[in-house]
Amino acid sequence: MARSIAAWFSRLRRIRGTIFILKNAMLLVNVLSLLASVGLLAVGIYGYSSDSVVGIVSSNLPLSCILLGLVVAVVSLVGCFGVANEARLFIRIYFILLTLLIFGQIVLGAVAASHKEDVEYYITQAWTNAYETDQSVLRRIQKYLKCCGLHDSSEMAVPDACPTTTPCIQSMKLKFTQGIGTIATTAIALGVIETFCLVAAGMLVYFAQLADDARETELLDEARQLALAERERSKEKRYNFETPFEDGDE
């Protein structure tokens, strides 16, 4: 009996130790996830600014980064609250939200990769729209990239803002690719963090259930031991009560 109790306590300590490690690891990783969401917000806001080539070519991409950053921040806060308070309902909600978030990022990444070869087309479309509606945007691009016109200095150029005769298409493609690379790097780092959190959340729920089962076993063992002790006391009382009469009869 003593050996089984010692083994049970050893198992319970291991379970609680694992839960402690998972809790602290998830809190740390969720803080990192919050920082990554701030990075996404910063990249999205910068990309949406008028001086960003990425924002000029496609405003949807920076807006997607801003939206993703906000969603990641909310999910991370839910995870921090659930883990810190051991609120299993919030941890399950966090697990579901994280699964949907990872799936959404995979879909967005696949869509972005499928349009990788269309960068020059999007740049041409954006340049044409800006030339017809707001040439001040092209003026800023030409000064910023030190170029003139789209494919050559005579194609949809703003002459008073041409520092050189170098066309802008190659510089814009390079800047756009660099911007996409920054966003992709941030998203990949975030995906690694989210995958770890997803696995850790599942393990935390599992080990929390093990701890509950162990506590239930503890209560059952205590009840069983109390019942046995009560039975032994009853037997002892009965023996002490019956023994004097037997001695008197003899």
Image (cartoon, rainbow, N blue to C red):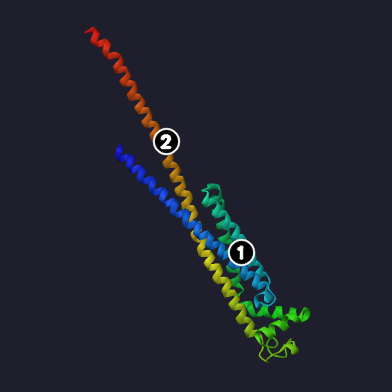
- On the rendered structure, is 218 left or right of 189? left
Say which amino acid is labelled 2: Leu
Count of labels in the image: 2
Front-most of 114 and 12?
A: 12
Look at mark 2 in the image and give the residue it sits on. Answer: 219
Q: Please provide percent x and percent y for residue 74.
A: 60, 57
Sooner in the amino-acid sequence: mark 2 or mark 1: 1
Residue found at x 38% / y 35%? 221
Q: Please provide percent x and percent y for residue 121.
A: 67, 79
Vertical placement of 248 versus 11: above or below?
A: above
Residue ranking furthest to the right: 133
Q: SS at mark 1?
A: helix
Q: SS at mark 2?
A: helix
Residue found at x 43% / y 54%? 21
Hey, which quadrant is residue 113 in on the image?
bottom right
| Local crowd size for mark 1, using a 10 Å CA cut-off: few (<14), some (14–19), many (≥20) | many
Say which amino acid is labelled 1: Gly
Look at mark 1 in the image and give the residue it sits on. Answer: 69
Residue found at x 36% / y 31%? 225
Vertical placement of 224 versus 166: above or below?
A: above
| Local crowd size for mark 2, using a 10 Å CA cut-off: few (<14), some (14–19), many (≥20) | few
- On the rendered structure, is 204 left or right of 184? left
Q: CA distance from mark 2 to mark 1?
A: 46 Å
Q: Does residue 106 appear in this view?
A: no
